Image: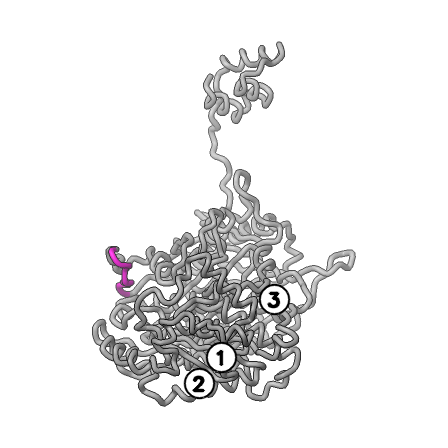
Amino acid sequence: MDHRDILTRFKNGDLGREQAAALLTGAHPGSAARHALLTAEVAPPRAAVSQPPPARALTTAPAGGGPPLPADGYAITALHGRFPDADGLDAFWHTAVLGGRDAGRRTSGSPAGAGAGAGDFDAVFFGLTPQDAALMDPQERLLLEVLWQTLETAGCTGARLDTLTAADGEPRAVGVYVAHDPLGRAAVAPAPAGDAPAAAGAGVTLPARLSTLLDLRGPGHCVGGGGAAFLVALHQALSALRAGECGAALVGAVAPRPGPARRHPQGAEGGQGVGAVLLRPLAAARAAGDTVHAVVRATAVAHPGRRAREAAADRLARRALAAAGVTAAGVGLRETETTVAATTGDTGAATGLAALVRAVLQLRHGTLLPAPGGSSAVPWARPHDQSGRELPRRATVAVRPAAGSPAAHVLLEEPPRRGPEPIAAGPAGPAAASGELVLLSAPTPEHLAATARRLADRVLPADAVEDGTQDGRRLLAALARELRLGRAVRDCRLAVVARDTGELGAALRAFADDLAGADDLAGADDRDGADDRDRADDRDRADDLAGADDRDRADDLAGADDQDRAGAGGARGSVRCADLRGAQGPGVLFGELPETRAYLAALWRGRRLDALARLWLAGVDVTAADTAGAAPVLPLPTSALLRRPLREAGCPATDGPTPS
């Protein structure tokens, strides 16, 4: 027998472990073993099983052969969504708490809903021309926005994104899994240089095109149609995470419903939804300081075959509970397509997303939303076991099968209880007096001003009371660090050294005000095309915008005067900016060299803030070399999107932008 025969017979039970080992290694077994080996060689093969084994639901706990589900599950580290009359999760929660009664009875095309301005899009922000954006399916445009905003919410569009690696060490290994309704028009994304254009209208290529636009290098899959589509996509994403194919996974869903919305019997209108979640192994998320909104403990997906829908749904519920080692008594909430419809109406492929968002928000707030036909929300009492030990709140999200679509079941759990995350301490002593270097970037000056104002208004209110206090300095240090590590590096840049949050807020507001009325700094090239871009380059790179002299003289950018002042920071509280869209060549430093990274890391350790600011404004990515220790992710407002109406391909509109 050759090795293959030996292994086959061992697997079938014809050979014992000692016998197989002896044959494989050439050892000499005892007489009894030799006799068994001789009889095994002439033994007839085992009869084939006449009946197939019972079918099994696909769960996150494989029945042998695969890696087991981690005991602590998978963390939802970010979620973002827009639903009827709720442009954000805070508005969605408010509407859900009131049982949908304040929805305003608007149509699905109302500005507050998920499909608000479905023809509006910020093409420039995503590096697209208006013509390319007009050719994309509206669902793809909506998904592109929410996937980016979900990554930004998690602080994973900058240097931190490179830390999300697959098992082989590949950075930016983020899977993209999307659920969508049937595409209504051709969807063509611009192909990379040398590649053929993507096939028009091919919904299955959505993850690939979205991954290309966002430069994500994980696997992807598309699930089309059906109320359980989002939960099926989530189930597939967990499989990729278990296999080590990605370090994180984006799972999104979109279901635009153009035209008047259908009123649900419970009173809700709408029928639209778009959103996404970011998943990571819980242990990795906690080690990285990520915000954990909820934990996915188990999933189960299966087609019902000819069985009744209710029987199939009950079967999956048992499978999911068994996989997590939880009894039905340990689950305090059940979200289904019925409970969702009372708030959002029929949301198609986003039904599972809406149900999951409702469950996560109830876990977060410790409040149970009104049941269909119920009167008001009620506090969610924390469960205990028979010995009085406190247990985590748990919820299930289930969507029953419809015609031609599967059923899906997800078990959620609130994250492990921890004390309040401390904000990392900022510098002390003389270093604290030098302030913090805050870096911000955007694709155009107009985007930069809008994002600066959003940050100042939402995080740095003018009446903040912690200015100058220890807590205020810690918040400033955490904010500066989060912007460096959590945000993508773009061509239009801002740098400011501030001593407290009040000074930073005032500086950002003044910068936004200065640019608001200046046509030559308001991104005219975004509206009028490449000819205006050339003229804007000449206007925007004046001496006070880190001009050519600064970019060409690296010695000046980190000169002796800076070294003598140990991070004094230049004009404290005043904003310096640069527009690098027309910059040519590799810049003053080649960032890929280890010597460059070592040099930049030394500047951060020495707090040479002015030198770092000058290098940043000259085009050097100084963020990746920040060697500060690990700290919790600080949630910040997402970057401003300046949406403009899209007309027919080749005829972009000239209407003004709509900030969001």
Give the vertical position of 613 relative to 56 (above or below).
Answer: below
The label nearer to you, 3 versus 2, is 2
Colour pattern = one colour
Q: Residue at x 28, y 59 (%)?
A: 192
- Mark 3 or mark 2, earlier in chain: 3
> In terms of depth relative to the viewer, which is nearer, 534 or 12?
534
How far separated are the C-alphas under marks 2 and 1? 10 Å
Residue 186 on the magenta segment? yes
Q: Residues within 10 Å of mark 1 (few under 14, many from 20)?
A: many
In the rendered structure, which amino acid carries the disc numbered 3?
A: Leu
Asked which secondary structure carries label 2, the reply is: helix
Residue 363 is covered by the magenta coloring: no
Which range of residues does the magenta coloring cover?
A: 185-194
**Type of residue at label 1?**
Val
Q: Which residue is mark 2?
A: 511
Query: Which secondary structure lies at badge 1?
Result: strand
Question: In the drawing, what numbered circle is on residue 496?
Answer: 1
> x, y (%) of residue 135?
26, 67
Please name the residue that numbered disc 3 is placed on. 363
For discs 3 and 1, the disc positioned in front in the rendered view: 1
Residue 184: name its quadrant: bottom left
| Residue in front for this viewpoint, 99 or 439 | 439
C-beta proximity under 8 Å, tags 2 and 1: yes
Q: Amino acid at mark 2?
A: Phe
Q: Residue 515 location, x and y as percent?
A: 39, 86
For label 3, the SS is helix
On the rendered structure, is 331 left or right of 20?
Answer: right
Q: Identify the mark nearer the N-term, 2 or 1.
A: 1
**Label pair 3/1, CB-CB below 8 angstroms:** no
Distance from the alpha carbon under mark 3 to that under mark 1: 39 Å
